[in-house]
C-alpha cells in the first residue's frame, strides 16, 4: 500500500495494516530546534511580515508574488549555512538533503496548495484542521501534522525535509490536539476530496512490455485509458467538475475530486462510487474477470466505445498479449466450444501469428460456420475481452474511506526523482511520464537560467515546472470561484429564511 | 418534523420501572397508536413498561437480529433468508399486517417499537456496534417491507413524504434507451423517479440506475431501495445522537447493567479469541521450518496462500495479512513468523523486508501500534465469516476463500492438488459452491479427509458432538484436523471448549 492508509484502524475490524505510526520527538512543535521550530516561528519577528505577505497573496487568483525568490529567501530564513547559490553537480542525486531543501524552498508551490485545500483566500479550518503525514528521510512516518498557514507548512518541510508527504481529511478538531479532546468522537474526519489511485501493478497480468516498477510509453497507455474512462464518468454521471489528475511519480496516477459535494461524502457513498466504477472481479485464479449483464449499463457502453480503439493499438499491437502459446487464455475467454476447437487447431499450427491476426481469426472462423452459439453471444464475449484488457483497474480501497491519506501533488517521488505533476485531461494522450522533470533537472534549470530586466522572477518560473504550476493555479482558481458562488448562494438562501 | 428523539428524553421518564409506585400512579404518557405495520422509528416510546418487559423484549429482538446476521454469514440468498427467518420472527417478534385481522396488532407493534429503541441504547456506544446494529436493523426492515401487504406498504410509503421528482414523459422518451439499459427494463413502460444519487448508494454501487449529472433515475420497482436507504440514513443519524446522550444514561443504575449485558452478548464472539486457543496439546512449539509440513492440515484458503507464496516467493498485502493471522492463531511466535516471511520472500533484500514488511507483521501481533492494538495483542485471526465477506481478490491477489473466489475448474484443480480426488465428493462440492454454501463445501471436504478418524472418535465416544460441529474458523479447521490425525499420540479428547474464537 504505497500511498494510502487509514488512521486509527482497530485491530479486529480494519483489514489493512497501518503504516508506521512513529512519532519522532523532534517533530513535536514544542521541541526547541535551532532554526524553525513551530513555536518559535509563531512568535518570531518575521511573523508579522509573513502575515502581511500571506494576506496579500490570497486575495485573488492573480497576485504577482510567489514566495520571495531564492536570494531574499535565504536572508529572511537567516540560514547563513545555506550554500549560495546552490549548485547542481553531476554527482547530485535527488535523495540528497540539500536537493530536498532547495526543492521545498524554491520550487514547491505551497501557495497554490494552500489555496487548493483551504477553499478560501483567508486561512480557515479547511486548511488548519487538515492532516498532513510526512515520510522522513529515515523512513519514519509522522502522522497528524497540521498547519495554520501555507508558510508554516513550508517551514516544517524545509526543516524536516520529508521525502514525501501525504494529505488526509479535515478533522473536527485540530489533528495536533487530538489527544486533548475529552471524547474520542470529538476528533473525527469531516471532509476530504474523493480520491482515486490507479497503479500499474494491477495490470501486471495483461502487461507484456515491462514488469515491476518500470514503465514505458506502451504501458502508460493503460493509465491513459483509465483516466479517460474514470474522468468522463465522474463528470457526466456524478456531475463533478473539479477533478485534478496527478502523475504519481512512477507508474500510476491519482485523482482528486474537489467539488464540495464530493468532499462531504461519507464512506458508504464513496464505496458506492468505487463500486460503480469497478468492473474486474476475481483474482488470478478467478478465470473470466468481466461478467456483466446485457444490455450494457450506459457507463459501460460509453467506456467500451472509448476503449475499443485503444484495444486495437495499445493492446493488440503494442502488448501483443496472445503471442506464441499465450493464446490459451484467449481461448478460455471464448464461450463457444466449436469455435474454440477450430481456433485452437489453427493456432496450434501457426502459434506465431500476432495477436491482431488472432483477434480477427475469431470473426473469420465464426463466419465460415465454426460457431455453435449465436453471433450475439460471441460479440458479447469479445466485448468482455476488450474490457478485461483495457477497463480501469482501481485500487478501490483508497477511494472507499474518508480518512485515507494520499500523496500530495508536486512532491518528489523518492524512487524516480520525478515531480508528481498534474495531468491535463484535455491533452491526456500527450502526457509523457518519462519526460516529467526530475528535481535535479529543475534545480539545474534554475542555475542555468539567464534572465534579464528589473522584474523579479520566481525560481519555479525559470524551470520546466511552469506549465504544471500554471495548470494547477488555474484549476485552483476555478475551484475557489465556485466555492465563493456556493457561499453567496448559502448566504442568500439563509437571508430568505430570515425574512419569513 | 416532530423534533423528538429517543436520546433527548430522560430515560427515567420514559421507562418507569418502579412497579410499586406504578400501581397507584396514572400513566403520564399516552399509548401510541400504530397505524402501520412498518415503522421508521421516528417517535420514541412514551408509555411505561416493566423491567422484565424491557429485558425480554430486547433479548427477543436481539435473537432475531443475530439470526439475520448468521444468514449473511452462511451466504443465504434473500429468498432463503426470508424462508429461514419466518419461523424465528413468528416466535420472537411477530408483526402482522392489518389485513391479517390479528388480535394483538397493537401489542405486537408496541413490542417492535420499544425493543428497537432499547437496542438502540444498548448498541450506540461504539462506532462498530452502531454500524452492525444499523446494518441488521436495515436487513430486518427490508425483509418486512418486502412481505408487507402491497396496499398497506403503499400507504406507509406515502405517509413518509419522501421527496422525489417524477421523470416526465418527454425526458423519459429522450432517455429511453439509456433508462432501459441501466434499469434492465423498457424505459417507457414504467414510472421513474429522479433523486440525488446519494439517496440510493446501493443502486449506484451495483450500477442499477442511470446517472446523469449527479441525479439517479430510479425505476418504480426499486423504490424499496429509496425507502430502505432513507431508513438507514435516519437510523444512523439517530444512533449518532443517542451515542452523544449516553453518558447521561450511565447514571441510571437500573438500566445500565441490562444494556451492558445486551451489548456484550452481541460482541463476545469476536472477543473470545485468546492465546490459549493457539496451544494444542501434543504439538511441539511451532517453528518457521515446520510450516511446510504442517500446511497439509491447513484449510484450503491457507493452503492456497501457502502454495502461492511458495510459487511466487511473494504474497500481496491482504493475502499476507490473512495468512499471518492464521499462523499467529496456530501458535507461531512473532519471531518465528518474521523468520518465516523473511525466508519466504526469497527475492527480497533484507533492507526492503525490514522497511516494508516487518512492521506489519509486528503490528498484527500487537508488538507495535497504539495502546489498543498492543493491549488486544494485535489482530484477531480471521474467521470464515470475515474471509467470506471481504472484498473479492483483485488481479494478482490470492486472499479470500477459494470456494468463493475460484472458478469451478480452478477450484477442482486446486482440490485435487491437495489430495481431494473423490469424484462424488467433488460433484457435491461443486453443487455447494454453486449455491454459495462455501463453508458447507469446506466442511464437507474436511469430513471426507478425516472420515476414518471421525468415525473412530464417534465410535469410541471420545469426542462429543460439539467437538465435531460445523467449522467456522480456519484455525479450528487446523486444530481439529491436526488432533484427528494424531489420535494415537495421546491427544484424544483434548478438543475442549477452547474453540470459540469467532462464530
Ligand atoms: Zn511498458
Image: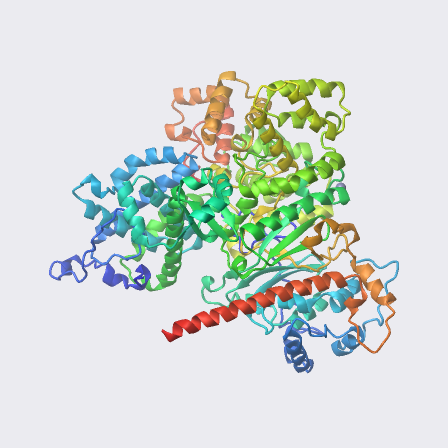
Rendered view: A317 above or below B219: above
Whether residue B247 sits left or right of residue A310 in the image: it is left
Whether residue B270 sits left or right of residue A430 in the image: it is left
Rendered view: B58 above or below A475: above
Q: Can I make out residue B330 in this image?
A: yes
Q: How is the image coloured?
A: rainbow
Residue for point 69% across, 28% down: A359
Residue B502 in percent (x, y) is at 44, 40
Q: Nearer the viewer, residue B83 or B38?
A: B38
Rendered view: A96 above or below B53: below
Residue B386 in percent (x, y) is at 48, 41
Rendered-image quadrant of the N terminus of chain B: bottom left
Residue for point 76% across, 29% down: A354
Q: Quadrant of ligand 1?
A: top right
Q: Nearer the viewer, residue B377 or B305?
A: B305
Whether residue B27 sits left or right of residue A251 in the image: it is left
The quadrant in which residue A226 appears is: top right
Rendered-image quadrant of the C terminus of chain B: top left
Residue at the far left: name it: B24
How many discs appear?
0
Residue for point 61% across, 20% down: A371
Residue A84 in percent (x, y) is at 84, 72
Q: Can I make out residue A79 in this image?
A: no
Q: Nearer the viewer, residue A446 or A366?
A: A366
Residue A475 in percent (x, y) is at 65, 62
The quadrant in which residue A67 appears is: bottom right
Amino acid at each position: 500500500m504505497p500511498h494510502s492508509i487509514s488512521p486509527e484502524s482497530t485491530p479486529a475490524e480494519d483489514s489493512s495494516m497501518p503504516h508506521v505510526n512513529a512519532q519522532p520527538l523532534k517533530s513535536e512543535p514544542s521541541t526547541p530546534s535551532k532554526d524553525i521550530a513551530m513555536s518559535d516561528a509563531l512568535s518570531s519577528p518575521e511573523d508579522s511580515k509573513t502575515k502581511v505577505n500571506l494576506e496579500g497573496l490570497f486575495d485573488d487568483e492573480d497576485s504577482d508574488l510567489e514566495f520571495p525568490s531564492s536570494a531574499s529567501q535565504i536572508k529572511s530564513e537567516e540560514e547563513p549555512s545555506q550554500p549560495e547559490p546552490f549548485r547542481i553537480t553531476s554527482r547530485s542525486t535527488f535523495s540528497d538533503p540539500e536537493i530536498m531543501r532547495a526543492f521545498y524552498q524554491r520550487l514547491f508551490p505551497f501557495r497554490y496548495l494552500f489555496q487548493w485545500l483551504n477553499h478560501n483566500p483567508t486561512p480557515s479550518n479547511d486548511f488548519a484542521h487538515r492532516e498532513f503525514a510526512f515520510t522522513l528521510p529515515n523512513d519514519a512516518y509522522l502522522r497528524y501534522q497540521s498547519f495554520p498557514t501555507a508558510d508554516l507548512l513550508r517551514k516544517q518541510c524545509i526543516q524536516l525535509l520529508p521525502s514525501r508527504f501525504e494529505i488526509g481529511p479535515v478533522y473536527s478538531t485540530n489533528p495536533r490536539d487530538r489527544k486533548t479532546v475529552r471524547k474520542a468522537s470529538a476528533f473525527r474526519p469531516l471532509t476530504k476530496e474523493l480520491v482515486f489511485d490507479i497503479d500499474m501493478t494491477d495490470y501486471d497480468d495483461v502487461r507484456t512490455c515491462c514488469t515491476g516498477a518500470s514503465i514505458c510509453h506502451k504501458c502508460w497507455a493503460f493509465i491513459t485509458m483509465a483516466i479517460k474512462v474514470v474522468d468522463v464518468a465522474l463528470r457526466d454521471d456524478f456531475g463533478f467538475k473539479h477533478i485534478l489528475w496527478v502523475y504519481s511519480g512512477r507508474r500510476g496516477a491519482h485523482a482528486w475530486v474537489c467539488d464540495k459535494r464530493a468532499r462531504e461524502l461519507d464512506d458508504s457513498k464513496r464505496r458506492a462510487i468505487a463500486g460503480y466504477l469497478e468492473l474486474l472481479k476475481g483474482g488470478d485464479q478467478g478465470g473470466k474477470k468481466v461478467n456483466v449483464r446485457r444490455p450494457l449499463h450506459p457507463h459501460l457502453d460509453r467506456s467500451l466505445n472509448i476503449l475499443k480503439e485503444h484495444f486495437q493499438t495499445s493492446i493488440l499491437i503494442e502488448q501483443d498479449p496472445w503471442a506464441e502459446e499465450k493464446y490459451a487464455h484467449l481461448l478460455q475467454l471464448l464461450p463457444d466450444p466449436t469455435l474454440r476447437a477450430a481456433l485452437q487447431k489453427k493456432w496450434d499450427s501457426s502459434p506465431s501469428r500476432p495477436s491482431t491476426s488472432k483477434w480477427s481469426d475469431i470473426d473469420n472462423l465464426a463466419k465460415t460456420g465454426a460457431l455453435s452459439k449465436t453471433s450475439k453471444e460471441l460479440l458479447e464475449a469479445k466485448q468482455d475481452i476488450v474490457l478485461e484488457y483495457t477497463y480501469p483497474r482501481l485500487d478501490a480501497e483508497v477511494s472507499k474511506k474518508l480518512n485515507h491519506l494520499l500523496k500530495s501533488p508536486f512532491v518528489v517521488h523518492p524512487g524516480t526523482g520525478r515531480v508528481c505533476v498534474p495531468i491535463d485531461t484535455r491533452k491526456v494522450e500527450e502526457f509523457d511520464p518519462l519526460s516529467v522533470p526530475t528535481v535535479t533537472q529543475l534545480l539545474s534549470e534554475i542555475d542555468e537560467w539567464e534572465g534579464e530586466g528589473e522584474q523579479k522572477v520566481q525560481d519555479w518560473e525559470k524551470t520546466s515546472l511552469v506549465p504544471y504550476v500554471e495548470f494547477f493555479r488555474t484549476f485552483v482558481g476555478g475551484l475557489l470561484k465556485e466555492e465563493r458562488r456556493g457561499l453567496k448562494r448559502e448566504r442568500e438562501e439563509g437571508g430568505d429564511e430570515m425574512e419569513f | 418534523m416532530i423534533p423528538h428523539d429517543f436520546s433527548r428524553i430522560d430515560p427515567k421518564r420514559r421507562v418507569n420501572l418502579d412497579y410499586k409506585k406504578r400501581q397507584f400512579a396514572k400513566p403520564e404518557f399516552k399509548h401510541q397508536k400504530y397505524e402501520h405495520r412498518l415503522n421508521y422509528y421516528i417517535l420514541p416510546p412514551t408509555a411505561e413498561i416493566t423491567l422484565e418487559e424491557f429485558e425480554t423484549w430486547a433479548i427477543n429482538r436481539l435473537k432475531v437480529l443475530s439470526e439475520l446476521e448468521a444468514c449473511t454469514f452462511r451466504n443465504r440468498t434473500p429468498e432463503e433468508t426470508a424462508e429461514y427467518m419466518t419461523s424465528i420472527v413468528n416466535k420472537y417478534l411477530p408483526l402482522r399486517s392489518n389485513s391479517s385481522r390479528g388480535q394483538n396488532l397493537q401489542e405486537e407493534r408496541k413490542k417492535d417499537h420499544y425493543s428497537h429503541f432499547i437496542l438502540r441504547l444498548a448498541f450506540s456506544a461504539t462506532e462498530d456496534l452502531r454500524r452492525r446494529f444499523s446494518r441488521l436493523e436495515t436487513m430486518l426492515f427490508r425483509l418486512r417491507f418486502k412481505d408487507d401487504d402491497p396496499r398497506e406498504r403503499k400507504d406507509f410509503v406515502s405517509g413518509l413524504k419522501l421527496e422525489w421528482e417524477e421523470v416526465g414523459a418527454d425526458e423519459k422518451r429522450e432517455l429511453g434507451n439509456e433508462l432501459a439499459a441501466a434499469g434492465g427494463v423498457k424505459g417507457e413502460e414504467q414510472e421513474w423517479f429522479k433523486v440525488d444519487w446519494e439517496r440510493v448508494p446501493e443502486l449506484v454501487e451495483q450500477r442499477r440506475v442511470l446517472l446523469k449529472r449527479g441525479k439517479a433515475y430510479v425505476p418504480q420497482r426499486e423504490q424499496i431501495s429509496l425507502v430502505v436507504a432513507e431508513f438507514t440514513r435516519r437510523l444512523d443519524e439517530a444512533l449518532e445522537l443517542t451515542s452523544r446522550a449516553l453518558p447521561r444514561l450511565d447514571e441510571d443504575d437500573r438500566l445500565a447493567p441490562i444494556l451492558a449485558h445486551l451489548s456484550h452478548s452481541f460482541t463476545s464472539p469476536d472477543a473470545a479469541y485468546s492465546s490459549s486457543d493457539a496451544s494444542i496439546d501434543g504439538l511441539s512449539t511451532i517453528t518457521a521450518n515446520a510450516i511446510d509440513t504442517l500446511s497439509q492440515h491447513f484449510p484450503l484458503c491457507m493452503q492456497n496462500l501457502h502454495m502461492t507464496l511458495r510459487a511466487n516467493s511473494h504474497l500481496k498485502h491482504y493475502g499476507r495479512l490473512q495468512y499471518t493471522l492464521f499462523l499467529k492463531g496456530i501458535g507461531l511466535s512473532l519471531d518465528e513468523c518474521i523468520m518465516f516471511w523473511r525466508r519466504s520472500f526469497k527475492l527480497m533484500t533484507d533492507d526492503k523486508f525490514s522497511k516494508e514488511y516487518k512492521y506489519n507483521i509486528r503490528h498484527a501481533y500487537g508488538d507495535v501500534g497504539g495502546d489498543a492494538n498492543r493491549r488486544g495483542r494485535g489482530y484477531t485471526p480471521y474467521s470464515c465469516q470475515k474471509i467470506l465477506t471481504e472484498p473479492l481478490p483483485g488481479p494478482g491477489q490470492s486472499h479470500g476463500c477459494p470456494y468463493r473466489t475460484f472458478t469451478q475448474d480452478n477450484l477442482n484443480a486446486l482440490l485435487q492438488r491437495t489430495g481431494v480426488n473423490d469424484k462424488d465428493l467433488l460433484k457435491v462440492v461443486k453443487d455447494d459452491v454453486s449455491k454459495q454454501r462455501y463453508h458447507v463445501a469446506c466442511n464437507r471436504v474436511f469430513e471426507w479427509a478425516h472420515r476414518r478418524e471421525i468415525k473412530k472418535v464417534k465410535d469410541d465416544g471420545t469426542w462429543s458432538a460439539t467437538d465435531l460441529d460445523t467449522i467456522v474458523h480456519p484455525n479450528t479447521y487446523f486444530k481439529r484436523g491436526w488432533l484427528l490425525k494424531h489420535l494415537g499420540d495421546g491427544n484424544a479428547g483434548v478438543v475442549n471448549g477452547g474453540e470459540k474464537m469467532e462464530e
